[in-house]
Image: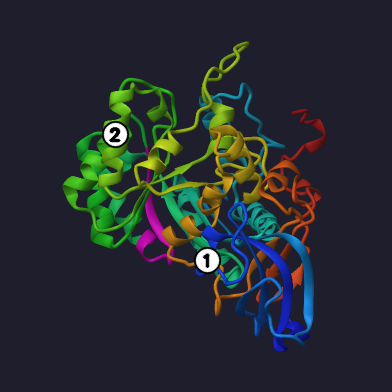
């Protein structure tokens, strides 16, 4: 990318509204309104040179862009995705929309089509989507199964190097928790530990969460210096959760790394006393929770000819109130687990607010798709003086406008350069073996 005058010469992005929770230090001047501080940003050499209260910047500075009082956000951090599954819906749909149907469909697609070229092209397409929508950090779970498991980690390292400086990538080994008692587990842990941004993961449910399996997983992660990122309780089973057992074993081991648990759907199906006890244990274990509302809304409580009764999401409000870090992420995108989505974290945020009723006020939850997952991933995305000039400029003046209209006209500032990127066309996927987009109705 060649330098533009705005990268070399200090210039202003004038009249922006920034959620105060996403600012390192709110500027002086008028007090924030509805959680939004009105600012002028000085951009120089690809960084934010200073943050002024609107109208208080020194006179004579050139204006790169006048944003007219509209909202500006940090880049997004998408902390739970499945890049290697993405965009297979057009060739392998879920026949009945169930969790079991999704597993069977992905297995068929993996065995029939997942060559390195197929996976690489779909992963690159997904990252192009995320880039266009303003994502700067992304963590993917990788099916570490059979021949795909042998090829996907070198492929991930190659792609992560290609995207360095645009999207910082991390990866999680996705296997059943019982795998960690098998002879190949130490070799898997070494592969993950040798991969920058690599961590161990597992699918853990009430029926496979034994102390022996969990202790083996936690022990390998500790021995290899890896964090844990787990799929937990992706179901509506009650009574009892695997989440409580994970918290117990993490505390018993005094595990030094970070433990993030995704889904945790069945927590919402326990009785009130059990919920409070489990939430307290999650907090005391220092674990984080990532909720995946779109995928869980699609899969959970589904039955033929039956209207779903519950929404599938975990207790995000109760967990947050207890002091547990709560985040949201894309999860599956256009695959048998979730046939929709586009790696657009602003859309994920808007849907999360509606699904989990987080509108009192929604500004309290913007950190759950930006600065909080970024911090969990070891990065700082707060908007601050001397920080990178990497921002998402929306077309909304208020949080209600932000949530009410798709922000398809957003601008993205990267390294101080203003762009208006567009996602890649779907036609790029048509060339892959087995794709039949015109024959897929839903």
**Residue furthest to the top:** 305
Magenta segment includes 195: yes
- At a point 65% along the width and 80% down the height, the residue shown is 46
Q: Looking at the rendering, in which quadrant would you find the C terminus?
A: top right
Which residue was labeled with disc 1?
382
Question: From which residue to which does the magenta span run?
Answer: 191-203
Measure how far apart labels 2 and 1 are at the Cα level. Answer: 31 Å
Which labelled disc corresponds to residue 278?
Answer: 2
x and y percentages locating residue 233 in the rendered image: 39, 32
Q: Residues within 10 Å of mark 2 (few under 14, many from 20)?
A: many
The image shows residue 296, relative to residue 226, as above or below, that is: above
Neighbour tally class for label 1: few under 14, some 14-19, many 20 plus, Cα within 10 Å: many
Q: Residue at x 56, y 34 (%)?
A: 357
On screen, residue 242 above or below 9: above
Who comes first in sequence, dot 2 or dot 1? 2
Which structural element holds mark 1?
loop
**Snapshot quadrant of residue 128:** bottom right
Residue at position x 51%, y 50% from top?
368
């Amino acid at each position: 990318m060649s330098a533009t005058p705005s990268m070399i010469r200090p210039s202003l992005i004038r009249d922006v509204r920034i959620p105060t929770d996403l600012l390192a230090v709110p500027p002086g001047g008028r007090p924030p309104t509805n959680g939004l501080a009105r600012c002028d940003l000085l951009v120089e050499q690809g960084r934010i040179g200073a943050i002024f209260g609107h109208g208080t910047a020194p006179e004579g500075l050139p204006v790169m862009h006048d944003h007219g009082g509209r909202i500006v956000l940090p880049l997004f951090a998408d902390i739970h995705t499945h890049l290697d599954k993405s965009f297979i819906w057009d060739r392998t749909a879920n026949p009945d929309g169930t969790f079991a149907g999704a597993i069977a469909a992905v297995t068929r697609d993996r065995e029939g089509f997942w060559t390195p070229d197929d996976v690489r092209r779909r992963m690159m397409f997904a990252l192009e989507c995320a880039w266009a929508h303003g994502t700067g950090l992304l963590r993917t779970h990788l099916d570490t199964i059979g021949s795909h498991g042998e090829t996907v980690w070198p492929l991930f390292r190659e792609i992560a190097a290609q995207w360095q400086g645009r999207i910082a990538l991390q990866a999680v080994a996705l296997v059943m928790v019982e795998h960690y008692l098998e002879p190949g587990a130490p070799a898997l842990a070494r592969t993950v530990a040798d991969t920058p941004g690599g961590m161990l993961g597992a699918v853990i449910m009430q029926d496979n969460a034994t102390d022996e399996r969990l202790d083996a997983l936690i022990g390998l992660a500790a021995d290899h210096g890896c964090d844990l990122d787990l799929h937990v309780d992706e179901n509506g089973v009650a009574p009892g959760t695997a989440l409580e057992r994970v918290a117990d074993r993490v505390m018993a081991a005094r595990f030094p790394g970070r433990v993030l648990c995704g889904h945790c759907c069945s927590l919402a199906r326990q009785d009130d006393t059990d919920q409070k006890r489990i939430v307290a244990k999650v907090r005391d274990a220092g674990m984080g929770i990532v909720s995946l509302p779109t995928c869980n809304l699609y899969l959970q409580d589904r039955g033929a000819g039956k209207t779903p009764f519950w929404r599938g999401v975990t207790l995000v409000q109760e967990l947050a109130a207890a002091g547990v870090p709560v985040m949201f992420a894309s999860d599956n995108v256009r695959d048998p687990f979730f046939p929709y989505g586009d790696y657009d974290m602003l859309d994920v945020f808007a849907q999360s607010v509606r699904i989990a009723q987080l509108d009192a006020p929604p500004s309290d939850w913007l950190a759950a798709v930006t600065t909080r997952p970024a911090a969990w991933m070891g990065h700082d995305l707060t908007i601050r003086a001397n920080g990178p000039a990497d921002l998402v400029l929306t077309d909304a003046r208020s949080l209600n406008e932000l949530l009410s209209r798709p922000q398809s006209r957003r601008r993205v500032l990267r390294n101080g350069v203003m762009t208006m990127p567009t996602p890649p066309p779907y036609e790029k996927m048509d060339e892959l073996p087995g794709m039949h987009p015109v024959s897929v109705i839903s």
